[in-house]
Amino acid sequence: MTSPIALIDCNNYYVSCERAFDSSLVGVPVIVLSNNDGCAIARSAEAKALGIKMGDPAHHLRDLIRQHGIKVRSSNYTLYGDMQRRVVAACLAFVRDFEIYSIDEIFLDFAGFEERDLVAHAHALRQRVWRWTTIPTCVGIAPTKTLAKLANAAAKRRPEFGGVADLRDAGVREVVLSTFPTDDIWGVGGATARKLADLGITTAAALRDMPLKQARGVGTVVLERLVAELQGIPADAVETVEPTRKGMAVTRSFGTPLHDFDGMMGALSQYAMRAGEKLRQHGLVAGRFTVFFHTNRHKPDRPQYAGSRSTSLHPMTSDSLELIAAARRCAERAWRDGYAYTKAGVLLDDLLPAEQRPRTLFEGDTAPRSRLMAAIDEVNGRFGKFTAVTASQGFRRQWRLRSDMRSPAWTTRLEEVPTVRA
DNA sequence: TCTGGGGTCCTAGGACCC
DNA sequence: TCTGGGGTCCTAGGACCC
């Protein structure tokens, strides 16, 4: 008998975070926009009821927003990250171990709690999270992660579950799986769903009953494991130690298109600066660095170009000035004049903990530069992102993001902590 | 007309996730 | 005019080796 796994998932997470500090958003349609205020990435129940879909471009929604008085917020990831810490803290007393799967989902290892009424246990957990954060959640319980995801989706969709669905019972499982569409299953995307549909497989129950060998033929080992998980055979454990990262990226769309190399270098320098900061935060160094930029792919009638170049970093480094130099080398080789660029980014690969990095013969004394980087991080952390900048980042920054409707840093900047008036 | 048989390592690209 | 950002995993195929 395998030990039960639960998935707790925050409902409409970004919207719920915004509502936690702004009661005017409660009970009305609310959407949160992606970076650059580009498209809707979170919707309240009321906004979903108005037909707003995940990823709908904001500029297509203008009429709807006006007509229904939909409240709009730019995304505020600092707030969402900080709220997640509070959700995790609320879970601790209820689990043996856990895995943070995404910004709004946590897998819970319920081993050792089997003797309890796990549904009641899950309700108590939801209650605790609600009291500590005012974030509403749903919980799915099952023998495998895939089934726990599915249970969670069922808990969200079917009011009769009251927020907690337990799929350990074969009867309940059959009812849920036989009506659950394949393309809503965790790990089945559009391409796989189409292949399965061609075989007449359109429900989770039918996919579960597919022979493992056939599943491998259709969708490699990934689909084979997924079918096993649907059968209740765990192929994916709750991972309680955070795996070391393999790569990192800093990419952005521009507020307005860029045409000149200096402007592009300004953006790329900023991204490289930020990439170095992320490496240093995680205590890592990178061995490979890539730059890319491209024109607007949503406008195929306009001249298109996508450029990308990589370079090795030796010695491996987290030094932002080294990364900026690498960005310039790559950008010069990839650059073409005469295009309207709308997005660019830098990618870091071959990451290694800084203490494990290979030493090179001619490395010299890196301590002064480390101190400089630490000082820059300190200044920017304390006084705001663009306090200490390199000259190449520029001062005009016409490429900067739009973020016109961002909520304050309620929980992470002292000046913006909300005040309560009696 | 015939044109080895394995290995390994790396990269690009597809598919998927939130 | 305006369409996000940041990840993971897997496979095929090329380069290279003996």
Image (tube, coloured by chain):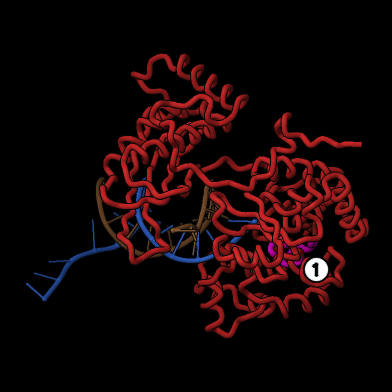
Chain colours: A red, B blue, C brown
Q: Where the C terminus of chain A falls, by quadrant?
A: top right
The part of the chain drawn in magenta is A139-151
Q: Give percent across and percent down for residue A254.
A: 45, 47
Element under label 1?
loop
Q: Position of residue C13 (x, y in %)?
A: 31, 62
Residue A213 found in image quarter: bottom right
Which sits in the foreground, A406 or A215?
A406
Q: Residue at x 30, y 60 (%)?
A: A303
**For the point 61% across and 73% down, which residue is it?**
A183
Q: Is residue A267 above or below residue A39?
A: above
- Asked if residue A107 is among those painted magenta in the image, a careful observer would answer no
Q: Amino acid at mark 1?
A: Leu
The residue drawn where x is 33% and y is 46% is A259
**Camera-side residue: A156 or C4?**
C4
In the shown orientation, is residue A294 left or right of residue A237? left
Categorize mark 1 by other alpha carbons within 10 Å: few (<14), some (14-19), many (20+).
many
Left or right: A219 as drawn, with respect to A421: left
**Residue A247 seen by the camera:** no
The residue drawn where x is 80% and y is 41% is A89
- Pointer 1 residue: A167
A347 shown above or below A370: below
Report in which chain the residue with disc 1 lies.
A
Q: Is residue A417 visible?
A: yes
Q: Identify the image quadrant of residue A153.
A: bottom right
Screen quadrant of the N terminus of chain A: bottom right
Above/below status of A37 relative to A192: above
Give percent across and percent down for residue A92: 82, 43
Residue A144 in magenta?
A: yes
